[in-house]
Image (cartoon, rainbow, N blue to C red):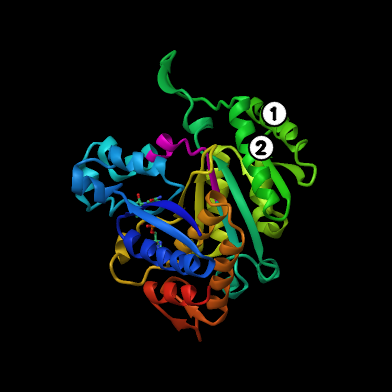
Amino acid sequence: MSEFNIAVIKGDGIGPEIVDAAILVLDSVAQKYGHKFNYTNVLMGGAAIDAVGEPLPGETIEVCKKSDAVLMGSIGGNTTTSPWYKLPAHLRPEAGLLGIRKALGLFANLRPCLLYPELSGACPLKTEISEKGFDMLIMRELTGGLYFGKRYTEEVDGVMTAVDTLSYNEQEIRRIAVKAFDVARKRRKKVTSVDKANVLDSSRLWRKIVEEVAADYPDVTLEHMLVDNTAMQLVRDPAQFDVMVTENMFGDILSDEASMITGSIGMLPSASLNETKLGLYEPSGGSAPDIAGMDIANPIATILSGAMLLRYSLDMSEEPDAIERAVKKVLSDGYRTGDIMSEGMTKVGCKRMAELIAYNI
Ligand code: NAD
C-alpha cells in the first residue's frame, strides 16, 4: 500500500463544500487502488484572518512544504461587503495566495481546457467548431515577466510616463519549457509555444531556449505561434492545440479566453507546480460567496484538480484516468449542477454530484 500526505486548504465561500467533494472522490480512489491519503487541514485566506489574524500563517507554509501535494478550494469573500477587504492589502485573503505561490516556488500554472461533448451547448462557438470538441492544456509561466518586472511612473519633460519591464532569463524559460514537454509526453505529444518573437527580445530568447529543450524530446512535436494569431486560432480551431506554453501575461489572457469557450468555470481545474513534484491544485474559479453553504456549487473543477494532483504530484496514471472517466460517465448519465443545467437533465447538488462520481470510480 502506498501512503501520501496531502495538505488541504479548504478556504472560504464554497471552498469547504467543493474540497469535501473532492476528498470523497479521492477516498474512493484510495479504496479501489489500495492507497492511503493522509489529509492535514491548514488555514489560508479569510478563514485564516478570522482565526489567527493573518492570511497565510507560517504553519500553513511548513505543512504544505512537507506534504506530497496541496489541495485547495478557493479563498476570498465578497470584495465590497466583506470586512476582510477593509484591511491593508498585505493582510487581505488574496495576499495568502500570492504568498503561498512564492513560498512554494510555484512557477508553472497548468490549466486544462476541455469541452465535454455533453456540454457542447454551453460553448459560445459555432456548432461546426464546438461539435469537434477540444482538449488542451495551457501552461503559463507564473513568477516572471511583465507582472514581476521593475515598474514606475514618473514625469518626463512635464509628461506623466509609466514604465513596466518584461524580462525573462534563460533559466526561467528552460524550466517551464521542460515542464511543458514533460506534460506533453503524458498527453498527445504536441507543444505550441506562444510568443511575440517578431517584436520582443524576451520572445526571441524564449523561442531559442524552447528549441534547445525540444531537442531532448524528439517524440514531441513543437510549433511556434505568435500570440495575436493564437488568440484567433483559439476561437477558429481550438481542437488543434494540445499543450500550449507561454509567458505570464500572454498566458493570463489566453487561459481566460480558453476557459470562456468551454462554457463553464465550474468545470475547470488547475495546478501550479514547482521544480520538485510538489504542486498546488485548485479549481480555476473563485470562492463564489453568492452561493456558499447552499450545496449548489459545481464540485467538478475541484474533483478534476484532485485528478491532476494524482497525475502530476503522485505520478499516477490509472487513478486520475478513472476520475476523469467517472466525471464523463456522470455527465453522460444526465446529471448536472445548476450552473451547467439544461433541459431534460437531472439537477443535483454539490454533495450528490460528488457521491455519483465517487460511485463511478
Ligand atoms: P467567482 O469565480 O467566485 O464567481 C463568479 C460567478 O461564478 C459567481 O456567480 C459564482 O456563483 C459562479 N461560480 C464560481 N464557481 C462556481 C462553481 N464551482 N459552481 C457554480 N458556480 C460557480 O468570482 P468572483 O465573484 O469574482 O470572486 C469571488 C471571490 O473569489 C473574490 O474574493 C475573489 O478574490 C476570489 N477569487 C479567488 C480565487 C482563488 O482562490 N484562486 C480565484 C478567483 C477569485
Please identify the quarter of the rendering in which residue 326 is found: bottom right
Residue type, mark 1 in image: Arg
- The residue at which mark 2 appears reads as 195
Q: x, y (%) of residue 213? A: 72, 34
The earlier-in-sequence mark between 1 and 2 is 2
Residue farthest to the right, as pictured: 218
Is residue 223 or residue 315 the one in the foreground? 315
At label 2, counting other C-alpha atoms closer than 10 Å, the crowd grade (few under 14, some 14-19, many 20 or more) is many
In the picture, the disc for residue 300 is: none
Any part of residue 246 in sight: yes
* Rendered view: 58 above or below 165: below
Q: Residue at x 25, y 51 (%)?
A: 47
Residue type, mark 2 in image: Asp
Residue farthest to the top, as pictured: 157
Q: Residue at x 38, y 61 (%)?
A: 19
Q: Residue at x 48, y 59 (%)?
A: 306
Q: Secondary structure at mark 1?
A: helix
* The residue stretch that appears in magenta: 100-110
Is residue 98 or residue 121 the one in the foreground? 98
Is residue 152 found left or right of 186 in the rendered image?
A: left
Q: Can residue 103 be found in the magenta stretch?
A: yes
Quarter of the render that holds ligand 1: bottom left
- The residue at which mark 1 appears reads as 204
Q: Are marks 1 and 2 in contact (CB under 8 Å)?
A: yes
Q: Is mark 2 within 8 Å of ligand 1?
A: no
* Rendered view: 232 above or below 97: below
Q: Can residue 313 be found in the magenta stretch?
A: no
Q: CA distance from mark 1 to mark 2?
A: 8 Å
Is residue 73 found left or right of 129 in the rendered image?
A: left
Q: Residue at x 58, y 61 (%)?
A: 261
Any part of residue 228 in sight: no
Q: x, y (%) of residue 233? A: 69, 52
